[in-house]
Amino acid sequence: MEEIKNYINGELLPAVSGRRLDNFAPATGEVYSHLPDSGEQEVAVAIVAAQTAFPQWSSLAAEERSRYLFRLADLIEQRAEELALAESIDTGKPVALARAVDIPRAVSNFRFFAAAATQFASESHATGKQAINYTLRQPVGLAGCISPWNLPLYLFTWKIAPALAAGNCVVGKPSELAPMTAYRLAEICRAAELPPGVLNIIHGTGERAGAALVAAPQIPAISFTGGTKTGAAIAAVAAPRFKKLSLELGGKNPVLVFADCDYPAMLRTTLRSSFSNQGEICLCGSRLLVEASLYEKFKKDFVAAAAALKVGDPLLAETQLGAVISRQHLEKILSYVDLAQREGGRVLCGGHPVKVAGRCAHGWFMTPTVIADLPPACRTNQEEIFGPVVSLAPFESEEEALQLANNVPYGLAAIVWTENLTRAHRLAHGLQAGMVWINCWMLRDLRTPFGGMKNSGVGREGGWEALRFFTEPKNICVKLRESPQSGSLPNHD
Ligand code: NAD
């Protein structure tokens, strides 16, 4: 059974206490590896390593840091098949999805920020002929990067890559539920001869390892992706310490379907936006709002297509939905199906666990689930479920669609299906979401701002936004000549 290790100062180490946690394979329900149960002690050692590495790493020319990141990308790419398999076993997701999405995106994250590092520039402001101001963008120093289990390597590297590119050293904590590819990344960093201490990866629970990272006074910036409740707990610890915070949190994303849409494309993509990765993507659309004139047809076609999706062994090529991350998560999703029925909802398909034969007999599988007739304000329609469950509701007008779409505490993403471009733009302006996809979903350009509003988070990742987050702007004002008044007036500010 593999023993996952921390990566501190270039070395692979167990927890100081020797304590370890079980790591389950969701498709079989079995423990298949262990990870260190780290806490304050390991975080403290990692911080010293990062502090020691920082002066040299931050002094490298951007091109040199960039070369390291390109090398990491190349090595991930060389091991792509092995990493896709590891991701699938660790999370229960179909290996085909890990192959097509998770691992290529981890490669792109490093390549993108390797290139961005060499292009990042800052502003200068001429104050007439009197002075010139220029802004230095210096690395914050040490960055804490905490990531969730749903897209493990994809989201971990989405934080690490810009943090390193900007010249910071990193202490990262991947999810304890899906730590394997972060461990492989540590091996890859060693193979790439990344200088010791530049990246440190601490494994363990959020309560111990994560909390120690957030509280550490030596780490001035925390980039976190995970649940809204956890984000609030982190903000409560970080705010009085005046840390920079980037919080990418939960969602309850609406899909607005108008009768004039490209129906086959909409149906195909909505199936994907509902059930990809077992619905365990923060960007999945979970509230399907459909124009009344199309509602009955959509309901019939969508339910038939959802019911036909193949749930099963994630390692089989034909599998479309694998296992959900844990027994507790499966129970949580099922409890929402119960709640939905108590709230007046009608389950049109799914709503129950799936028994998969053979090696996956004890895995945590669930059917794609579609629920109709729920009132908009009920808990099922307001709270994030993060599983293969969507609700359907009809709307009569564009105004009603917008009102329903915005009527949740979250504001991460929204999806609009219509061929009427004016309407699409109008809606996009009114939607309370950090990202709006029109006639598509998960079409990503890594330069764009990524993140949400309301309870979906604070700040944005991606492109320059990420490099700005991981740097501290410093304005430098250089006087060029005496102004006519200088000396005669008191200085202000
Ligand atoms: P989670 O909040 O339980 O855990 C996320 C990470 O935070 C894990 O590494 C965990 O160990 C750590 N953590 C937990 N408590 C902590 C604490 N007190 N201090 C510091 N770290 C702590 O989330 P999850 O269950 O792993 O992920 C699912 C959630 O993530 C969903 O709500 C989903 O919407 C959200 N998510 C958001 C985005 C986005 O970009 N907005 C992307 C993916 C997932």
Image: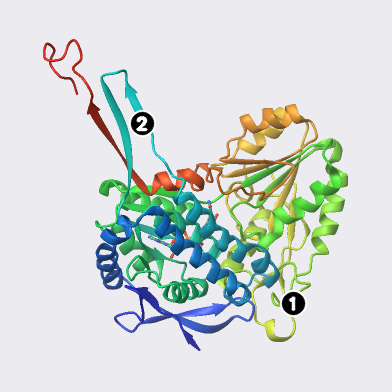
365 sits to left or right of 163:
right
Farthest bottom residue?
A: 1
Label 1 C-beta lies within 8 Å of the nearest ligand 1 atom: no
Secondary structure found at label 1: loop
**Which amino acid is tagged 1?**
Leu
Quarter-wise, where is residue 27 in the image? bottom right
Residue 458 visible, this angle: no
Q: Which mark is residue 51?
A: none
Query: In this picture, is 100 found above or below 284?
Result: below
Per the image, label 2 sits on a secondary structure element best described as strand
Q: Which residue is mark 1?
A: 316
Q: Residue at point 74% right, 42% down?
A: 439
* Label 2 CA crowd tier, 10 Å (few <14, some 14–19, many 20+): some
Depth check: give the residue in front, 472 or 26. 472
Q: Residue at (31%, 56%) from the top-left corner? A: 58
- Which percent across, then down, holds residue 416? 71, 39
Label 1 neighbour load within 10 Å: few <14, some 14-19, many 20+: few
Q: Considering the image in quadrants, where does the C terminus appear?
A: top left
Give the residue displayed 32% in from the left and 60% down from the top.
Answer: 57
Q: Nearer the viewer, residue 383 or 374?
A: 383
Q: Is residue 388 among the parts visible in the rendering?
A: yes
Residue 477, image x and y in percent? 25, 30
Relative to 127, is 261 above or below?
below
Q: Is residue 134 left or right of residue 98?
A: left
Circle nearer the viewer, 2 or 1 = 2
From the top left corner, tell me how far across and down residue 199 is, in percent.
Answer: 37, 66
The image's mark for residue 124 is 2
How many numbered discs, if any?
2
> Mark 2 or mark 1, which has the lower sequence index?
2
- The residue sitting at 73% across, 86% down in the picture is 358
Marks 2 & 1, CB-CB < 8 Å contact: no
